[in-house]
Image (tube, rainbow, N blue to C red):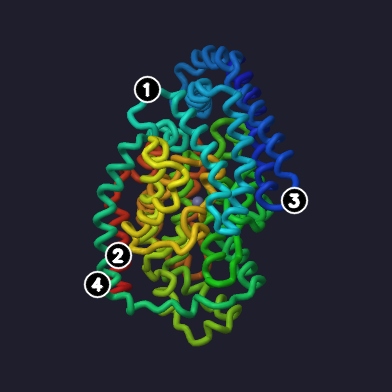
Amino acid sequence: MARALNQLREQMAEVADLQAASALLDWDHQTYMPPGAAEARAQQMATIDRLAHQQLTSDSIGELLQTAQSEVEGLDLDSNEARLVKVTQRDFDRERRIPSRWVSEFSQATALAHQIWQEARGTSDFSKFEPSLERIVGLRQEYASFFEPYESIYDPLFEAFEPGMKTAQIRAVFAELRPALVDLVQRIAERADRVDDSFLHGKFEDAPQWEFGLEVLQRMGYDFQRGRQDRSAHPFTTSFSNDDVRITTRVEGELLTSALFSSIHEGGHALYEQGVDPQLQRSPLAGGASLSLHESQSRLWENLVGRSRPFWRFFFPELKERFGQLRNVSLEDFYRAVNRVRPSLIRVDADEVTYNLHIMVRFELEQELLEGRVRVKDLPPAWNQKMNEYLGIVPPNDAQGILQDVHWSGGAIGYFPTYTLGNLISVEFYQSALRDCPQIWAEMEQGRFDSLLDWLRQHVHIFGRKFEPLELLRRATGQELSPQPYLSYLHEKFTEIYQL
Ligand code: ZN
């Protein structure tokens, strides 16, 4: 009966294989590849990406989709079959607008740009990266043109990461968040002396940081039989199937918790990928629902779990054993230190209150870039000015400013707001999980995360890409996307820590 559906499934499985092969080349590129291989690797990735794109957008997929549409009629709309057709159609319609020529140009440009960004960041010299970024912004503007007409040039880029969402929604979220956050930052600044985190800064050995991170990951439920952790310039998670989900971190040795929170963060992404229903593998339904959903998982583990008292009641004694510097530090002082709020330069190390201000800086600059209101070469001063306006600090150099993040070198423009949405969604999920499983904190105090991980698997992970992000949120929590739960959470937590 369902002949077209089966053929569709087979052809899309090959697309998934090509995408996984490309992801593996990219993982190698960012971890172990010798620098001299950059040109050859860029060509290899461009070829594979073009082949995947050609197959996904071929006439034969279009025809199979039409027939499969009638084959799934009458089936439960939530069934894997009906969803497969729906999601593949959405991807097909979107990708069909993009010429394969653009895909391989983009793939090659971004593969080359990665190394150039790394060198530019290493020497803190934006001018080295400028021509690459110029090219990428041009390609992204061209990409947006394939989706004309649009309300905002940002829409087509953002929607590629967040199916079903519009730029106007982010603007509304930020308009509500910004004054509340700025106010909270100011009130905390008046009580800055309440929290001392000096013992987190200094010289810390590499090996015990690495090992402690592995232990935390293991306890979180990350399956090392189906994953591994390596080092890279910028931490990331990648997945070639739900049986091979890899993470990376960077150990810098100056801030004790930097590598650890990065491992927990990437571990949250990886648990999501490892938890997708195996039946959805090698199909367009594998992987996370969107980037904000992905980020809701990583931020939930990093902040709501990793910066909580129950978590450190278990792990702090273990950390103390590894680092003699903490000998005279109490649990309470440590808890406050890892939650210290202070405007800082590096987004990934930012606290929960100032973090979203970093995102707003990027979001505004990206819109100005795409709309042609700011030129690439003027980005460093524009960045510094916005940092001053939003966070009250000016980076001393480009490495700690505009060059800090890998994303633009990978062509990920229109991506940053998903971090803020992820923060909001993380709180909505966590509160629902705590309501359903009040034992979560007691388990955590014993170094166990079973009930929390189970809840996330059943309500979020297992569905892969079957549902659009906000629909998945609604199904899991019964709620809409809103900044309010997140703001209340911050308010409550930091009022207590800083005695506001
Ligand atoms: Zn992340």
Query: Which residue does the numbered mark 2 point to in the structure image?
Result: 185
Dot 2 and dot 4 residues touching (CB under 8 Å): no
Query: Which residue does the numbered mark 3 point to in the structure image?
Result: 34
- Which label is found at residue 95? none
Measured in 3D between alpha carbons, the distance from the residue under mark 3 to the one under mark 4, in whole angstroms, is 52 Å
Q: What element carries label 3?
A: loop
Residue 248 is situated, as x and y percent measured from the top left of the image, at: 62, 55
Query: Which residue does the numbered mark 1 point to in the structure image?
Result: 149
Q: What element carries label 2?
A: helix
Q: Which residue is drawn at 67% across and 27% down?
A: 14
Dot 1 amino acid type: Pro
Dot 1 and dot 4 residues touching (CB under 8 Å): no
Query: Which residue does the numbered mark 4 point to in the structure image?
Result: 500
Total of numbered circles in the picture?
4
Measured in 3D between alpha carbons, the distance from the residue under mark 2 to the one under mark 4, in whole angstroms, is 11 Å
Between residues 394 and 335, which one lies in front from this camera angle?
394
Q: Which of marks 1 and 2 is in front?
A: 1
Task: Decide if residue 433 is in sight here.
Answer: no
Q: Mark 1 vs mark 2: which is more N-terminal? A: 1
Q: What crowding class fits label 4: few (fewer than 14 Cα within 10 Å), some (14-19), or many (20 or more)? A: few
